[in-house]
Image (spheres, rainbow, N blue to C red):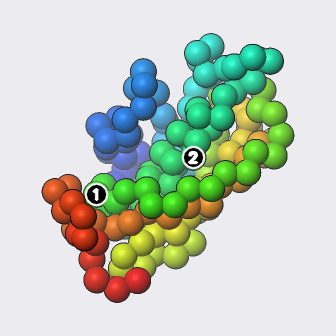
Amino acid sequence: MSLLDAEEIETVIRRNVGAPGSPQFHVLDIGETHADICLPYDEGMTRLGNTISGPVLMTLADAAMYTAIIAHVPDGEYAVTSHFHIEFLQRPRAADVLARAHLLRVGRRSVTCRVELFSQDFDTLVAHVSGAYARMNTATSGTGGATSGA
């Protein structure tokens, strides 16, 4: 069960994800251990060859992990990216990009996730991401502010 509804999560993302041009991520679905989000296509997202750029894909994947964490982890809004690895599998066409983030493990100190990125529909997998977020006590925790345990 989600701690926040889709609209509340979108508000948190827009407030907390520092991305140039304030991309308009849309929460499509919140499942028991996953979140689906969409980044609608914009011409500024492409690079040479009319393909979605790597930095756009990485931003979307990170936002998808954050969405899943906000939806399912108490005080998830204060979590910060601690690990991020992406494998580009095929060239994404110039279209909407969808992300499905799965929570693999929710620990006391960190949350481990995986994300699949799709071009326009959930049939064309373009990248796979693994990552983790460090859980923080509050927005002002600074260094060493993670909760105890792993």
In the image, taking residue 1 as reference, residue 146 lies left or right, namely left
Residue at 23% across, 69% down: 145
Looking at marks 1 and 2 on the same chain, the residue that comes earlier in the sequence is marked by 2
Along the viewing direction, whichever of 103 and 45 lies nearer the viewer: 45
Q: Is residue 116 visible?
A: no
- The answer to whether residue 46 is left or right of residue 111 is right
Please name the residue shown 27% across and 77% down the image.
147
| Residue that numbered label 2 is attached to | 61
What amino acid is found at the position of numbered circle 2 in the picture?
A: Ala
Give the residue at mark 1: 78
Residue ID at (25%, 70%): 144
Relative to residue 93, is residue 71 depicted above or below? below
Q: Residue furthest bottom?
A: 149
Q: On the image, which quarter does residue 47 sit in?
A: top right
Q: Residue furthest left?
A: 140
Q: CA distance from mark 1 to mark 2?
A: 18 Å
At label 1, which amino acid type do we have?
Answer: Tyr
Q: Position of residue 106 (x, y in %)?
A: 45, 75
